Image: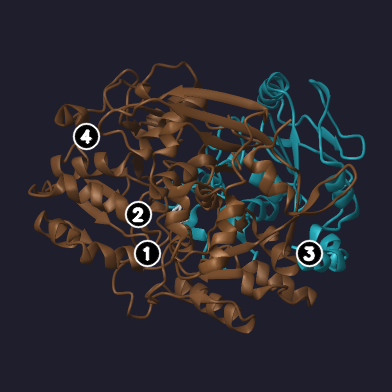
Chain colours: A brown, B cyan
Amino acid sequence: MGKTLFDKVWDTHVVDVIENGPQILYIDKHLIHEVTSPQAFNELKQRGIPVARPHKIVATADHNTPTVNQHLPIKDELSRKQLAQLSKNCKENNIPLYDLGHKNNGIIHVIAPELGFTQPGMTIVCGDSHTSTHGAFGTIAFGIGTSQVAQVFASQCLLLQKPKSLRVSVNGKLKKGVLPKDVILYIIAKLGTNSGTGFFCEYAGNVFEEMSMEGRMTVCNMSIEMGARGGMIAPDQTTFDYVEGKEFAPKGAEFDKKVAYWKTLPTDSSAIFDQEYSIDAADIAPMITYGTNPGMGIKITENIPDFNDSSFEKSLEYMNFKKGESLINKPINYVFIGSCTNSRIEDFRIAADYVKGKQKATNVNAWLVPGSQKVAKQITEEGLQAIFEEAGFVLRQPGCSACLAMNDDKIPEGEYCVSTSNRNFEGRQGQGSRTILASPLVAAATAVEGKIIDITKQLN
Amino acid sequence: MEKFTKLTSRAVPLDTENIDTDQIIPARFLKATDKLGFGDNVFRDWRFHKDGSLNTTFALNNAKYRGSILVAGDNFGCGSSREHAAWALVDYGFNVIVSSFFADIFKGNALNNGLLPVQVSAAYLKKLMAHLQENPTSEIVVNLEAQSIETTVGTATFDIDPYKKTCMMNGYDDIDYLMSKKDQITAFEAQN
Ligand code: SF4
C-alpha cells in the first residue's frame, strides 16, 4: 500500500515509538509568541533545564500588540509586561525575536512563510491552534498547548499519537467571486465542526492545485475549525516558486536538492485514507456565517436554517438572528479585514480591486490590518494604500488585532462585524460582539454598502 | 503534577454544546505570564453580566450544584489552543470533565495538568445531565485505574491512552520522559 503525504513526513520524524503509547516526534521549527510561551519558559527555569535548540525557534510579538502608534510604549501595562517578558526570555535563551517594530514583525503564521522558515516536508509547531496554516506547504504543522511548548523547548520533540488520515477533495470549476475562504467555510459548514477531530486532513483536487500559496494558507488555516489537528496540501511548482529566494530558504544547489526531495512527498496513488470526502467545486458559493461557531455557515443567498436544538437556538439568540431569515440587507457597522486567515497581500489586492473608485459607507468602521510589516510595505508599494484612503478606509499596523481583541481593537457589545478572521465565537472580537465570517471580497463589499449584499449579483 | 487515582464527588451539569476555550477563558485574561489565578475568570462572560453582577441562571452560580466534576455538552474545549483554559478549570476546582466529545488540543492540555477528560456516549451523557439537573446531590465516582465512571444512571467505561494513564496515576509528565531520551534524540539529529 502506498503512503500519504502525511505519512511520508511523519515517518521521517519519528525518533522512537513507545510500546502501547505515543511516538516521539522530532520538531524542525518551533514558532513562539508572547501569550503562550511565558509559562513554558518558567517551567524550564524551575526545573533547571536549558532550551535545547534555540536556533530552531522563531519568535514574534503579535497577539497582544497595538495596531496604532507602534513606535510608542504600549499603554496597557499587562500587555507591555508580557512583551517585555518575551524579549527577556528570547535574549536569555538566544532565540531570534522579531519584536514590535522590527521589519520582519507580524502575525507568526504570516511571517514564517514569507521569511522562508516554512518549507515542505517539515514538522512545525506553535502554541497557537492556527499553526495548521503552514500545512499549505506540505508541512505537518499543528497547534500545541503551553506544556507542549515546554516539552519542545526541553527536547525539540513531542510525545504524540499518530492521528488518522482524512482527505477532502474538491474538483471542478469555482464560480466567479468564490475565494479560498469560501471553499473552506463551505467545507466546514458541510462537514461540521468536529468532523476532523482525531484526523490530519489533506486537501486534494484541481481546486487546490490551481490555488495560490496565499489561498492554500487560508484553507489550511481553518482546518482546526473542523476539529482537525492540521491540514496539508501537496507541494508542487507553486510551492517551490514561493519558497525560492525567501530570506531563510535554502539557496542554490541546496535548494535544488531539497526540491528533488519535496517532489517525492505527494500522496501515492495507492494510499488509503481512513476517511474521504469529495466536493464539487460548482456547488460552492460566496459564504457567510450566522451563528457562533464556524460550522454555522450558509451561502450568502441562503436563509438561516431551522433546527430544533437548544445550542442552535442559544447561538441565534446571541446573534439576534431568526430561524429562516436572510442576512441580505442586514446593516453592518464594523468590518475587519485581517488575521492569519486573510491578511496577506492577495487579500488586500482583492479588497482594493473591489473598493477602487467607490466610497466606504459612512456608518461603517472598517479596520484593515495587514498580517506583517512586509505586507504593509507591499500595500503601499503597490498603490493599494492610496486606493483604500481615497475610499475612506484607514490602514492600521500589523498584528492579530480584532481577530481576538486582546488589544484595543474591540467590536462594541451588540454590534455586528463582518470579519475575514476564523472564529465567530461569542465575544471573540470583544465582549458581546457578534462576528460574521466572510471572504475579503464580501467584507469589502459590506464596507462599501454598509450592509450585507448579494455579491453574486454584482459579479454576474 | 498531582497524582490522580479515584475521585468521588458531586458534579456541576453544564448543558451546552461546543463550549470553546474562548468561553472557558476569554482572551482579555491571557496577559498573565504565570499560571495562577485563572480560576477567578473561568467562564467569565457566562458567570457575570457585563456590569459585573452575578448571572444566577448560569450552572456554576447555581447554589444547588457543586463538586469537582464538570459535566458538559458535546465537543468540549474546541477552538483556541490556550492551555489557560485547563489552568482555569483546575484553578477553579475541577478535577474531571465529563462530555461525549473533547477537542484534541484541549484533551492533551487537560491531561498535562492533571485534569481528567472522561468521554462517555451521547446517550449516557444525556441521561446523566438530566439526572444531575433533577438530583443535584447525586454523587459520581471516577476510577482511573478501572477507567470507569459510576453514577446513579449506570456505570460506563472510558478510554485513555495507557501512557497518559500511567503519567496521571504517578503524577509525572512528558518532560520527565523526554529528558530521559536525550541521547536518542541527539543521535536522531545526527542521522538526519
Ligand atoms: S490572527 Fe487570530 S487566529 Fe491568527 S494567530 Fe492571531 S489571534 Fe490567532
Looking at the rendered structure, the kind of residue marked 4 is: Ile
Tell me if the residue at label 2 has its CB under 8 Å from ligand 1: yes
Looking at the rendered structure, the kind of residue marked 2 is: Ser
Q: Residues within 10 Å of mark 4 (few under 14, many from 20)?
A: many
Discs 4 and 1 share one subunit: yes
Answer left or right for B182 relative to A39.
right
A92 to A121, vertically: above or below: below
**Front-lying residue, A396 or A312:** A396
Residue A228 visible in the shown view: yes
Please give the residue where the numbered disc 4 appears in the rendered image: A452
Please give the residue where the numbered disc 1 appears in the rendered image: A372
Q: Residues within 10 Å of mark 2 (few under 14, many from 20)?
A: many
Q: Where's residue A176, x and y in %? A: 25, 31
Q: Quadrant of residue B16?
A: top right
Chain letter of disc 2?
A
Sequence-first disc among 4 and 1? 1
Looking at the rendered structure, the kind of residue marked 1 is: Ser
- Look at the image and tell me in which quarter the C terminus of chain A lies: top left
Mark 4 touching mark 1, by CB under 8 A?
no
Looking at the rendered structure, the kind of residue marked 3 is: Gln
Q: Quadrant of residue A388?
A: bottom left
Task: Give the Cα distance between marks 2 and 4.
Answer: 21 Å
Q: Where's residue B45, x and y in %? A: 48, 47
Discs 1 and 3 share one subunit: no
**Front-lying residue, A171 or A313:** A171
Task: Give the Cα distance between marks 2 and 1.
Answer: 8 Å
Task: Give the Cα distance between marks 4 and 1.
Answer: 28 Å
Mark 2 touching mark 1, by CB under 8 A?
yes
Task: Give the Cα distance between marks 2 and 3.
Answer: 39 Å
